[in-house]
Image (tube, rainbow, N blue to C red):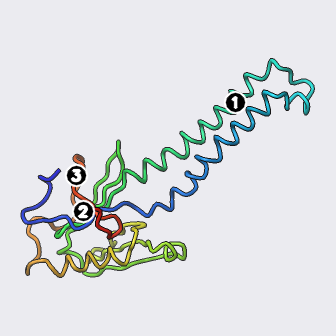
């Protein structure tokens, strides 16, 4: 909600993790129903009875039900949770803070005041480099730095963070230091996914 913005604070960019984690669920979403339909048609045509003579036509409905149940289990038990997890993760960079929000039913919000950030690092695997994503690490001087995983257009996002830090008033931002937890509220602001303005 807008009331969560601090006085004078503006939203710079809102994005989600790089969607490469959805490649396998997307493939399974296409392949599994096709395989289930093919297997069901093969069962209805009497395929199992040709392989195992003990399997009669009385088994047809049960075997088709097993195919449908397996397909539903893969789609609902594997694909859907990963899509929802990706959709429920959002990174919001404002002129004063970086907020990472995770989860829908069980929500976890992580905030870092840009005034406390001493260094901004990008860590990339080979696949992340190919997709131009990366893990943004914010060094705040604490023993463990804050890591925002799999940010799309990582170099552009880092530049946004550095520009926001450069734009902070002298002395930092009162009342926004450290990390806070906000269990309620969505982010209704206009977004620029991966650094590209969608307005």
Q: Is residue 22 above or below residue 137?
A: above
Residue 15, x across and y down, in percent: 33, 62
- Answer few, some or many: residues within 10 Å of disc 2's Cα (few below 14, many 20 plus, some between 14 and 19): many
Residue 46, x across and y down, in percent: 85, 27
Q: For residue 120, which quarter of the picture?
A: bottom left
Residue 107, x across and y down, in percent: 32, 48
Element on which disc 2 rests: strand
Answer with left or right where residue 23 lies relative to residue 155.
right
Element on which disc 3 rests: loop
- Please state, as top left, top right, bottom left or bottom right, where the C terminus lies in the image: bottom left
Question: Who comes first in sequence, dot 3 or dot 1?
Answer: 1
Q: Residue at x 17, y 75 (%)?
A: 115
Question: Mark 2 sits on what residue?
Answer: 111
- In the picture, the disc for residue 89 is none
- In the picture, the disc for residue 188 is 3
Give the residue at the far front of this rendering: 199
- Answer few, some or many: residues within 10 Å of disc 3's Cα (few below 14, many 20 plus, some between 14 and 19): few
* Nearest the eye: 34 or 127: 34
């Amino acid at each position: 909600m807008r009331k969560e913005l601090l006085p004078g604070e503006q939203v710079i960019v809102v994005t989600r993790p790089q969607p490469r984690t959805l490649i396998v669920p997307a493939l399974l979403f296409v392949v599994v129903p096709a395989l289930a339909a093919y297997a069901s048609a093969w069962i209805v045509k009497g395929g199992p009875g040709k392989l195992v003579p003990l399997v009669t036509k009385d088994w047809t409905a049960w075997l088709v039900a097993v195919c449908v149940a397996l397909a539903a289990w893969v789609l609902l038990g594997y694909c859907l949770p990963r899509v929802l997890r990706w959709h429920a993760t959002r990174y919001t960079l404002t002129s004063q803070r970086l907020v990472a929000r995770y989860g829908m039913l069980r929500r976890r919000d992580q905030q870092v005041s840009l005034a406390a950030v001493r260094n901004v690092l990008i860590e990339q695997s080979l696949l992340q480099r190919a997709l131009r994503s990366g893990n943004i690490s914010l060094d705040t001087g604490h023993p463990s730095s804050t890591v925002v995983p799999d940010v799309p257009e990582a170099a552009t996002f880092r530049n946004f963070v550095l520009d926001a830090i450069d734009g902070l008033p002298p002395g930092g931002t009162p009342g926004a230091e450290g990390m806070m937890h906000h269990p309620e509220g969505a982010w209704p602001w206009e977004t620029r996914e991966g650094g590209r303005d969608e307005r």
